[in-house]
């Protein structure tokens, strides 16, 4: 983003605006009498740059990744002019910017795009989500316990269980020291599972792809599900300290059917986790609600996991 405005006269949160322009995709939401530019939106947080007293000319096409912007002084405020790759252009006149952030309970949220190992994929998704929350919003946006869980984004064995389709998948870009620190966090979470802890200690000493693969194979096994269950519970505890998103939807037949199914499965000895898929509070409210049952069968010699989905709104 180009500007000739001296640093002392720039609007509040100029650096975050510059960061967004440089990232490529821009999403402008105009509702509730506010003009917001999406900063970080995930299940744990909704955050925005808010243009105060904004007047928008044209529209922002969030599908265009090539954005070139110029920020100038304008009367008693500023004007942001954005050229979107020569295909589109818009301007925003505004007095100043503020930053809006809302933290939400993420422990009961689930997204399941890939079949098999859904328990481990759920962990992968939530750990990366927490990492983004702490990375972009700062350590003050979470607790020490959340920071420890977020550090597992550097735990390479979990990358064998991606939660999203291949075009969105990430690789573990951590260095050896970050991998070792993440391994120590996992060792502490796995306390009581001596066999897994021994393998984690080997991985900590040699955080190679070969050792990561060995740990990943062990984490899939029935006898180590206790550790996965422990981390899921920790995620849910940490998430529960934040406000739940509030929507006006009634208990319909699908919710009743999901509740009945959950009770039946638990009576038969299955472990059942109830997760919601729900839209954000700001924007994107046309996303449907789903109740989802993640079912874990530990009754046989091999662990089985699957998800049943119920559309509830």
Image (cartoon, rainbow, N blue to C red):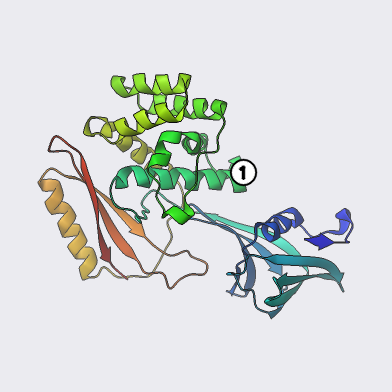
Q: Tell me residue 306's x, y (percent).
A: 23, 50
Q: Is residue 169 above or below residue 209?
A: below
Tally the marks: 1
The residue that mark 1 highlights is 138
Q: Tell me residue 195's x, y (percent).
A: 29, 21
Q: Is residue 37 above or below residue 108?
A: below
Q: Residue at x 20, y 39 (%)?
A: 303
Residue 278: quadrant of the picture:
bottom left
Residue 239 visible in the shown view? no
Looking at the image, the residue that sits furthest to the bottom is 58
243 lies left or right of 288: right
Q: Tell me residue 222's x, y (percent).
A: 22, 34
Residue 303 visible in the shown view? yes
**Label 1 neighbour load within 10 Å: few <14, some 14-19, many 20+:** few
Secondary element at tag 1: loop
Residue 64: quadrant of the picture:
bottom right
């Amino acid at each position: 983003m180009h500007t000739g405005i001296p640093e002392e006269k720039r609007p509040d949160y100029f650096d975050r605006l510059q960061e967004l322009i440089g990232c490529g995709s821009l999403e402008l939401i105009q509702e509730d009498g506010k003009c917001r530019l999406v900063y970080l939106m995930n299940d744990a947080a909704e955050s925005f740059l808010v243009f105060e007293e904004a007047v928008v000319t044209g529209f922002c096409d969030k599908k265009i990744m090539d954005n070139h912007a110029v920020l100038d002084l304008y009367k008693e405020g500023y004007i942001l002019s954005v050229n979107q790759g020569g295909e589109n252009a818009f301007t925003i006149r505004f007095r100043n910017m503020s930053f809006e952030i809302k933290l939400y309970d993420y422990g009961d949220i689930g997204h399941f795009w890939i079949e098999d190992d859904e328990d481990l994929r759920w962990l992968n998704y939530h750990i990366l989500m927490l990492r983004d929350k702490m990375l972009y919003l700062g350590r003050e946006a979470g607790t020490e316990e959340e920071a420890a869980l977020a550090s597992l984004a550097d735990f390479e064995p979990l990358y064998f269980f991606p939660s999203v389709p291949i075009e969105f998948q990430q690789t573990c870009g951590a260095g050896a020291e970050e991998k070792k620190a993440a391994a120590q966090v996992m060792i502490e979470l796995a306390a009581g599972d001596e066999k897994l802890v021994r393998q984690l200690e080997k991985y900590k000493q040699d955080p190679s792809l070969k050792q990561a693969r060995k740990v990943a194979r062990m984490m899939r096994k029935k006898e180590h599900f206790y550790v996965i269950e422990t981390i899921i519970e920790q995620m849910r505890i940490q998430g529960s300290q934040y406000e739940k998103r509030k929507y006006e939807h009634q208990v319909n037949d699908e919710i009743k059917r999901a509740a009945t199914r959950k009770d039946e499965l638990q009576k038969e000895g299955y472990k059942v986790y109830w997760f919601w898929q729900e839209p954000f509070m700001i924007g994107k409210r046309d996303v449907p609600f789903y109740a989802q049952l993640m079912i874990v069968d530990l009754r046989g010699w091999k662990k089985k996991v699957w998800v049943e989905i119920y559309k509830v709104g």
